[in-house]
Image (spheres, rainbow, N blue to C red):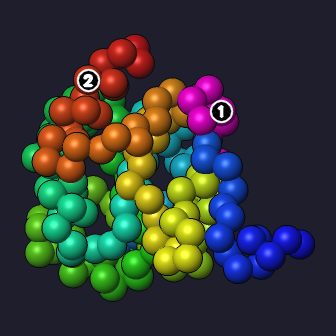
């Protein structure tokens, strides 16, 4: 093993458009077990990764998705947030900002690493959103996140996935 990998400076390659979405299961802010497989054949999935609960950029992004929640649902998608924070932290964040979607706890960073979005050294998730179709394929990857109108970015791309 190289020194870079030993120090945790390298992460897995980021999942790209056209790839099969890595499967996962994790607990959300309510303690419910959520699996990617639960949505196959039913709904597209907006899987968004963010660094930390209740920080300015992450709050703006989550609130934007909250504000666009109905339109995103109407487009046939569900929203799942992921960070390395705990379910308890997610619960407080979701309650404070009235977030109507599941936020998955990934304290061991298995999902973050599977999608290749782990920040070197800190271990937080990078701010990246994956749009996964009903067959489990990554159709779009958004790396240039506009936190205050992320819902509009997502909606524009969901419309192109039909």
Q: Residue at x 49, y 77 (%)?
A: 122
Pick out the residue farthest to the right. Answer: 1
Tell me if residue 72 is in the magenta stretch: no
Q: Are marks 2 and 1 in contact (CB under 8 Å)?
A: no
| Residue where numbered disc 1 is placed | 19
95 to 25, vertically: above or below? below
- Dot 2, how many residues are within 10 Å of its Cα: few (below 14), some (14-19), or many (20+)? few
Q: Position of residue 10 (x, y in %)?
A: 68, 64
Give 65 or 57, whichever is nearer the viewer: 57
For numbered disc 1, what is the local secondary structure?
loop
Pick out the residue farthest to the front. Answer: 3
103 to 96, vertically: above or below? above
Q: Residue at x 40, y 38 (%)?
A: 142
- Please name the predominant secondary structure of the magenta segment in the image: loop
| Residue where numbered disc 2 is placed | 156
126 to 120, vertically: above or below? above
Residue 134 left/right relative to 32: right
Give 6 or 26, whichever is nearer the viewer: 6
> Which quadrant of the structure image shows residue 137?
top right
- Can residue 41 be seen in this snapshot? no
Q: Position of residue 134 (x, y in %)?
A: 51, 30
Give 110 or 117, whichever is nearer the viewer: 117
Residues drawn in magenta: 16-26
Residue 6 left/right relative to 115: right
Chain-order first, disc 2 or disc 1: 1
- Dot 1, how many residues are within 10 Å of its Cα: few (below 14), some (14-19), or many (20+)? few
């Amino acid at each position: 093993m190289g020194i870079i990998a030993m120090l945790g400076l390298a992460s897995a390659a980021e999942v790209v458009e056209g790839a099969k979405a890595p499967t996962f299961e994790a607990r959300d802010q309510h303690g419910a077990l959520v699996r990617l497989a639960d949505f196959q054949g039913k709904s597209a999935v907006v899987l968004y990764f963010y660094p930390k609960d209740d920080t300015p950029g992450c709050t703006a992004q989550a609130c934007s998705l909250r504000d666009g929640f109905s339109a995103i649902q109407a487009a046939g998608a569900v929203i799942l947030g992921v960070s390395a924070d705990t379910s308890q932290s997610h619960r407080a964040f979701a309650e404070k900002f009235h977030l109507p979607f599941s936020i998955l706890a990934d304290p061991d960073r298995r999902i973050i690493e599977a999608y290749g979005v782990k920040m070197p050294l800190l271990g937080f998730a990078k701010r990246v959103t994956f749009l996964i179709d009903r067959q489990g394929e990554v159709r779009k990857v958004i790396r240039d996140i506009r936190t205050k109108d992320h819902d509009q970015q997502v909606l524009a791309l969901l419309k192109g996935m039909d």
